[in-house]
Structures are given as C-alpha cells and as structure tokens.
Image (cartoon, coloured by chain):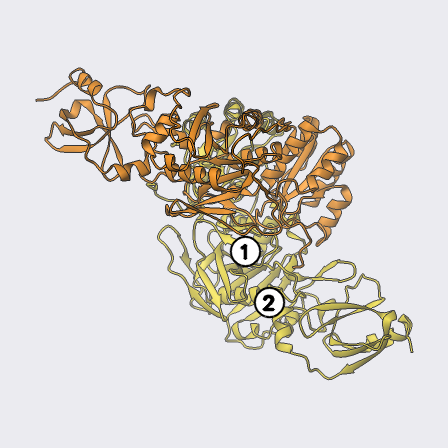
Chain colours: A yellow, B orange
Amino acid sequence: MSTNDDDLQPILNNIKIGDTVSVVLNNNSIISGRYMPRYESSERDHMVIKLPNGYNVGIILKKIKSIKVSSFTIETEKLSKNTLYNSSSLLSQDENDNDLSQISDLPKIVIISTGGTIASKIDYRTGGVTSVLSAKDLYTSIPELSLYASIDTEILFNEFSENIGPMQWHLIANKIIEKVNSGNYDGIIISHGTDTMSYTAAALSFALQDLPIPVIMVGAQRSSDRPSSDASSNLIASVIFATQLDYSGVFVAMHGSISDEEIYCHIGTRIRKNHTSKRDAFKSIDISPIAVVQDDRIEIKKIPSNIILHKTKNSNKINKEFNIISKTKFDDRVFLLKYYPGLDPILIENVQKLGYKVIIIEGTGLGHINRNCFSYLKEAIASGMLVFMTSQCIWGRTNLNVYDTGRDLQKIGVISLSNMLSETAMVKAMWLLANYNDLDYIRNKMQENISNEITFITPIVE
Amino acid sequence: MSTNDDDLQPILNNIKIGDTVSVVLNNNSIISGRYMPRYESSERDHMVIKLPNGYNVGIILKKIKSIKVSSFTIETEKLSKNTLYNSSSLLSQDENDNDLSQISDLPKIVIISTGGTIASKIDYRTGGVTSVLSAKDLYTSIPELSLYASIDTEILFNEFSENIGPMQWHLIANKIIEKVNSGNYDGIIISHGTDTMSYTAAALSFALQDLPIPVIMVGAQRSSDRPSSDASSNLIASVIFATQLDYSGVFVAMHGSISDEEIYCHIGTRIRKNHTSKRDAFKSIDISPIAVVQDDRIEIKKIPSNIILHKTKNSNKINKEFNIISKTKFDDRVFLLKYYPGLDPILIENVQKLGYKVIIIEGTGLGHINRNCFSYLKEAIASGMLVFMTSQCIWGRTNLNVYDTGRDLQKIGVISLSNMLSETAMVKAMWLLANYNDLDYIRNKMQENISNEITFITPIVE
C-alpha cells in the first residue's frame, strides 16, 4: 500500500521531534532513527531522520508505506554530543524562553547569539539554514551544560559572519557592556560565525579593555546536525572557560585538534581561521592558547611573560556591580592592502582619493613592497594618511631595519607593526580612528601593545 | 702604541680574505678569527672578522694596535657550512669565471642568480648588502657541491624579490628556456629572494609546462655570513634535487625544519612563505613536500594520486636536445582583493574603472564576502570582468555550495577556485590573460588543474 503526502501529514503532526520512528518504505526496507525537524520554509514533501550513526537522511513522503513511532531507544548520549537541536523546541523558541536557571549557586553566564554555523541547521533538501538558540535548546540537547552554569541566552542578531562588520562589532560590544554592568554574570559567551570571528574578537579586544569577566567567543565549523559537528563540544568548553578561567578579556574557544579531545582558549587579537573546513581551523599565531578543555576539565597554561592578562574581578559573587565605560565605535576608513607582485601602485592614489585615512599594508617577508610603490606612499603620507606595515607571512614579525627596502620605507614614514596580524591591525586602526582625533596619538597607539596584539615586546636577536 | 687608519691600510691590503688573523686592540685584548670582506661602498675605517663561533664582528681601525696574520688554522669545515663567501673572490667575480667543471661525467647544472638574501652579505656597519654569485665562490666555499654536479653559473639580474614581478618572471622564464634548449644541462637552479619566491615559482610553473628537466628555486632566510644561515645547506640540497630528482617541473628547495637536518622540495604552485624570519618558513599547502634531502641524501616521497608530475627526459645524457616553446608573458591587469569586514565595495567599481580584467577575491572561510559587495561584483562581471574566489584561510578549499552566501555569489557569476592559493590564482590569471584572448577560455582554464595548483581534484565528502 502506497501513501501520499496528505495521508502522512496527520501522522507527522503527531510525531514529536526527537521521537524514535521506524519508517517502512514502499520497497519494504525499513529506516529507523530519530525524527528531526524540517526547515520551516522548505517544501513539506519529505521528513528527516537522524540515523543511529549520527547521519541525517531525508525521505520523500511519497516513498513511505508506513511510519511507526516507537519508544525512545536510540543512543541519546551520542546524539546529544553531536547536535544542539534534537529537542522539540527547535522551531518556535524565543528569547524569553530562558527561565531554566534552576541551580542558584552555579556561576551565571549569558550566551549571546549573533548567528553563524553554530546556531544553524542544514535542511537536507534545500540546503537552507535556520538559526535559533535558546536556553531550552541548550539544556535539552546538551544536559552537561547545567553542570557548569546557570545560563541565560539572548539572540542579538542572526547573521552569517561574512556580513558582520564595524556596525555589528559596535552592537555586540554595547550588548556585552550592558550584560557586564548588570552585574548578573560571571562570564559572557558570544556565539558567532567562524568566517570573521577573529576580526570580531580583535574588535571586542580593543573596544572592551576594562572587562572584569571573561568574554568567550565560540563558533562551529560544522553545523550542529552533522555527525562531525563541533558545535556541542565547543559550546561546552566555552561555558567552562566562561566560568572557570580566572582571566578577564576576550577569548575564542574552538577545537584544537581534529579529534573531539581538546578545545583551546585563544587570545582574541592573536587568532586566525587557517582552514576553510577543518574543526581545528583556528590557530593562535606566534603564541600558544592560554587554556585547554579536555574531558570537560580546564587546564590553564602558564602565561608567558610577553602576554598580559588581568585577573577576573568577580571572585566575590555577591554585590559585583560594574560600570565599564568603553569606546565601541569603529571607523571603516581603513584600507587593508595585500601587496602582490604586479600591483599597480596607482591603487594607493585611488585609496587616498576615496577618503581613506589609514592603509595597513600586508607586505612580503619582513615587511617589503616593490619600490615602485614608494613615491605613492610618500604622497599618501604627505597628505595626512597613516601607513602601517604588516606581513602576509602571518607568522613572525615585520622588521624594517634589515634590508634597504625596509629602511627606505621607514624614511618615507611607513611604520612597522612587529608581529601584529594584518587583520588585527586593520581592526585596531578602525577602532582608534573612530575614538581618537589626533593622528599622532593614533600613530603612537598603533605601535603600542594594548591587548596582546604585539607579542614581540622586546627586540629579538635572531 | 696606537695606529691610525692610514697605517693599517697597507697591512689590510696584504691580508687575503679568508686569512686567519689575530688583532691586538689598544686595550691589549686580542680578537682572532678569519678576515672577512668589507662591503665595497662602505667606509674604510673598519675591518670585519669572523669569530670561531661563526659570528662576525666589525672592528674600528682606530682601536687596533697591531694585526698578526697567522696560518690557516680555524675550523674551516664549520665556517664553510655557514658561509658562501669566505673565499678571496668575493668582490670581483664575473659570470665568465665559471670554468670549474672539472669532472666531466657528473650531471651538469646551471645556477641562475636573480638576487636576494642567498646571494647577499651584510656589512655590519652600514647594513648595506652586496650580491655576487659565481662558480668560483661556490666551489671555494662549498666544496661538497663538486661531488654532485658540474656547475655553471650566471647572474641574470640582482634584485631583492619584493622588486620582482611579471616582467622579471618573463626574463627568468626565457633564460630557463634558453638553458634548457642548449641541451647542456640536467637541471637548473634559480636562486631568488624568499619574499616573493612562491609567486615566481607559480609563474614559472604556468609558463614552463613542458620542461624536460627539474628547475629548482632556492633561497635563504638568513644571509650567508650569519652563523645561522641556511644559504649553504639549501644550495647543496638544491643541487641534489636538480641532479637526482627524477621529475621535471618547477620546485622550491628550502629548509623543512628549524634544524639543518632536512631540506624539502616543494611543488611550485603550492608553496607559501609562512614566517618572516625562520629558516623553515616555507610550507607546502594542503600537500606534503615531494622529496627531502637529509644528510646530503635525497628521499623521493610517494607521490599521491592527486599530484601530477612528469618524469625527466634527460635519462640519456648524450644528444639531449630540447626545443621547448612556452608562453612566458604576464599581464598585470589582475587585482588580488583580500576581503575584510568594513571593506567599502566601491573599491570594486574603482578596480573596474582602472581597467583591470580579473579580480581574485581572497574571501573568508569557504569563500564568502559581505553581501553589500554583490551588486558591485554583478556590475563588474556584466562589464566583462572575471571574478574568482579563493580563501584567506590558506589551507582548505573554497566551496560556494554550502551556504546561501556562496550560492548567491555563484548566481552572480563568481567562480570558486577550490584550494588554489590566492597568490597562485593571481599569477595564473596574469599568465592566462597575457597569452590567451578568449575570456571563456580563460574562465575555463582558471578552473582546470594545470600544474597542481588545484589538488582537491574530486569533491570531498566532509
């Protein structure tokens, strides 16, 4: 007996998301697994089942002979490790649904969602993505979280991070200030798409220099309904960092290896997404991560002398009232120029004419570019622009004293930024430009270590 | 008794570069070491001595009481490992001085010098750099070379590699063709500054697709008169690769680890300088090096199936006459745009107006940029430009099928380049643009693997 869509819809309406079902197909083969939510806007001619091996399959309703809803038997532990959204609450959460802070003596944190893969779910037919994050989702799908903290959540906005820029950095920073000053939280988690998470982490590091508590950014390289997802393990670790790290500041919690074993805590200004898809894509550059979560236990590393961290100010959990005042604006008149052979230096003139105030050059090696750019840079600097040099090598520091090219660049007025990442330098310049008027001050501040963006503090003998 | 400069000059004129000297200072302390050349244009008020520990010191002549020239006793082996230029020939070589091919049954190679650190020497007072490379220098300072090959040398030009671009790629490619077609050589070595060596390696990989012999690019991260120099060991390895690698094509020979132990042979299109100063700065991206020299012995690795290499055609060393015909032009109307949050998309319009034909975007993650760029890209593509997507993650491949952003970019006409490095993509576009007129052909060729620039040949299930 073959069914049609209309026959099945009443049945589907009676199955709860998360129920274990056995689906008999027209060819009499049977598929068993957990009933998964379907992307709301997708067509209604299929259902999605999570198999015991963790993979999801979409089944066209037309091919289904019958559906049996059985008791809850499949390996819940395994699934909960791999998905945030196996609860029935997936499609209809709102941010008021965050009254699950049952255990009052636990540290209290807030998770602020901004979108991205960690808060998304693939629809296997359309490829479309939805993004919802609420306390109920978290508690239902990752019961371990309640061991570590009492958690509030808030959806600030819902953007894939390629669409996040200076305006959103401003919003996130202000939201963090609001949460910090409420005095309610021991730590704050920002869930964020991974594409530009390092840029946002740098932005928050400069905007929020007087944080009394840790702000942990967290993302996922694989969406939460994929068996290889890192969403759940990264989030658990971020909660541990937010509640047990005794340093304040802005950090990034992401997988440290291709296994599920280790989640690293990186300093916000020294992090880079170095792989398009691997779970351990994020790397601390020129330094090591400051802490690691392994088997749900935190290990805080010895902090080397060239890293400056401040202890949290929340040891007395009662009466902690903060009034941090931060500069959260960003000015986008900063151009990040990656040098490459054959670059027409007329572009520098163009950037100048477009009204940019700062150029961050990503030079070659120790900080070099073709000498045919020199006269254009000289002109740009004479017109009042600031020009800084970083390296496209990523690791290591610029040094304009070694070769003639570097010395000539210095004579022109180009300023070396040591081992500041080009991306971090760009963000720092945007922040300084928005919050200070004096170009001399900005020039000096760019060269000064504010938030561990320069870790070669003293000259290195090589 | 104190001397003055004029007293010492006659003595200095009689000391040969490389002689061991004991210098008695006015304070009666004694400095012994090997007499080193002084940079020709520098002031003549000092002398340079290489100490037994490998370091060079400059001594002001005014501080010298006497100089004793002793017999040649310091550890020559150690020094020869660390410097190319301990011979008396440093300052007056010319390229005709290459008649040292004593042993006729050895493979024959030519080393073509283009400048850079490997061919340079620091003057410890001025910081100025000179660059000379001749057969006599090599044989005198690295006697091991004569074990592996009979070597000719030629100085093509003398540039630090930040000044090398499309015009120089053309010159180098044509010189290689001349040398290959002479039939005289089993391998060719190009010594080159490290800053843009990967760009040049990619350029030669596209320009010289029908090479019958290996072309090995080699450089040094530390100049040859520094104790930590990698010049000598890299050059020895490059000679071994040039004579014993049984694959033709363009490769890069550089340190593989911070020790002197291993020199790697990298594929020319998949290499990146990933540290500003370390000796093991160069990394093969998404693949492993194809061969390694350790203790002067070559080990050729198993070549994975996604790498395509051709065997050399020089097994019969007599009567090998080649007539390779290659396309060696490059057109610089290619813009490499590193995306960053806050980028004003008006820049895309500007690049279009400046007459560029191709934009290579270095997007975030799997190949994304802010949606505020979309209309500008659409306009650029409608005007006849080609727009390609790579990733600033460096490792991994772009994939415009996973997220909405990617699918939208594809609809606009942006083309994903898989795991082609952005720098390699830029060079490839410059090469295609100069040698082919048909934009459709160029668009297709960009997506086709020509010289191992794309190694994710088949779709990967992640």
**Could you tell me which residue is drawn at 13 percent across and 29 percent down?**
B24
Q: On what subunit does the disc labeled 2 rest?
A: A
Q: Are marks 1 and 2 on the same chain?
A: yes
Residue A344 on image: x %, y %: 59, 26
> In the displayed structure, would residue B373 be above or below residue A69?
above
**Could you tell me which residue is drawn at 51 percent across and 60 percent down?**
A256
What numbered label is drawn on residue A177? 1
**Could you tell me which residue is drawn at 32 percent across and 27 percent down?**
B123
Image quadrant occupied by the N terminus of chain B: top left
- Any part of residue A92 in sight: no
Residue A5 on image: x %, y %: 89, 70
Of the image marks 1 and 2, the number of the one nearer the N terminus: 1
Q: Which residue is mark 2?
A: A232
Farthest residue, direction bottom: A71
Residue A425 on image: x %, y %: 50, 41
Q: Residue flagged by tag 1: what amino acid is it?
A: Ile
Q: On what subunit does the disc labeled 1 rest?
A: A
Residue B27 on image: x %, y %: 11, 30
Instruction: State the count of labels.
Output: 2
